[in-house]
Image: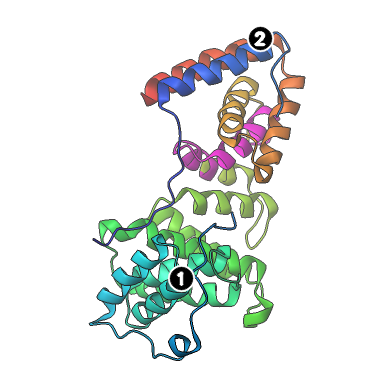
Amino acid sequence: MIVFLQAIASTVGPRGRRGTLLLALGCATVGSLAAGRAAAFDASEPRSIAAATQPLTMFKDPRAALAAGLESYHAGNTKKSVEALRYAADGGESLAQWKLGRMYADGDGVARDDAKAYSYFAKLVDHFADDEPSPRERLMAAGAFVAVGVYYLEGIAAAKIMPDAGRAFDLFRYAATYFGNADAQYNLARMYLDGNGVSKDARQAANWLDLAARKGHAPSQALLGHLMFNGEAGGPPQRARGLMYLTLAREAAGDRPTDQWIVELHSRALARASELDRKSAVAMLEYYLTRRD
């Protein structure tokens, strides 16, 4: 059975999270809060010279190739998986294009190749710009728009793609508004904060961050909390509310090196927060988590 592959962040239940978060803030109140993917697969045995020269397996159709490619991927046979997925992708199977794009972007069982990743994601963008994605395809479609947007932000020398902030902004805005994608909303906010491809607008940035933060997007919670705490969200400081969002983000970040910036923002805010700020943040956090149950 073909299964749509989605990136799912494993989390504890809301009630368990409430206890953890309130404990963190409670400890902070007394000054004792603790600060703080190459994909593995079993390489198949080398094939014999005769086997290596055999023609690629022929598939009944692209859909059958997609099923075979996903099965091989989960079995750890990346080479066979890529062969089948390429056949499916060339036949117009969107999920195969998405999976290959992610594999090349992440170096998942293949050498990282941003040019190849971009080419697969761009096919999806072209397709879903004209055709309505099915409910099961919406997450994949939104992810493709965001991925291509990021590539336009940074450029890809190997593919002779120059940075184009305006194009990136348009892609992020489409994914943020049409799909409600939190990553796109976060990237839009960063562009508004940096004045990259658009005029600086802290209030617009805060609005996009708020939408993403309400979806549990940790980077958005952290950045929104930082802006609120410091009065940089287009209004006066909201220190308790900012600390609440920073605490949510800090708990989600864990010890991942890529999220160290969240840990640092949270630590700095705690050091500057008053006792009243912390107590108010505890109350806000309790109310926030109760409403999410």
In the rendered image, the quadrant that contains the N terminus is bottom left
Q: Amino acid at mark 2?
A: Leu
Task: Indicate whether 262 appears above or below 61.
Answer: above
86 inside magenta stretch: no
Q: Tag on residue 155? A: none
Task: Indicate whether 75 appears above or below 248.
Answer: below
Q: Residue 250, image x and y in percent? A: 61, 31
Q: Residue 169, image x and y in percent? A: 55, 62
Left of 63 or right of it: where is 56? right
What residue is shown with label 2? 276
In the rendered image, the quadrant that contains the C terminus is top left
At mark 2, the secondary structure is helix
Q: Is residue 170 visible?
A: no
Q: Amino acid at mark 1?
A: Leu
* Magenta residue span: 208-233
Q: Residue 211, image x and y in percent? A: 47, 41
Q: Tag on residue 100? A: 1
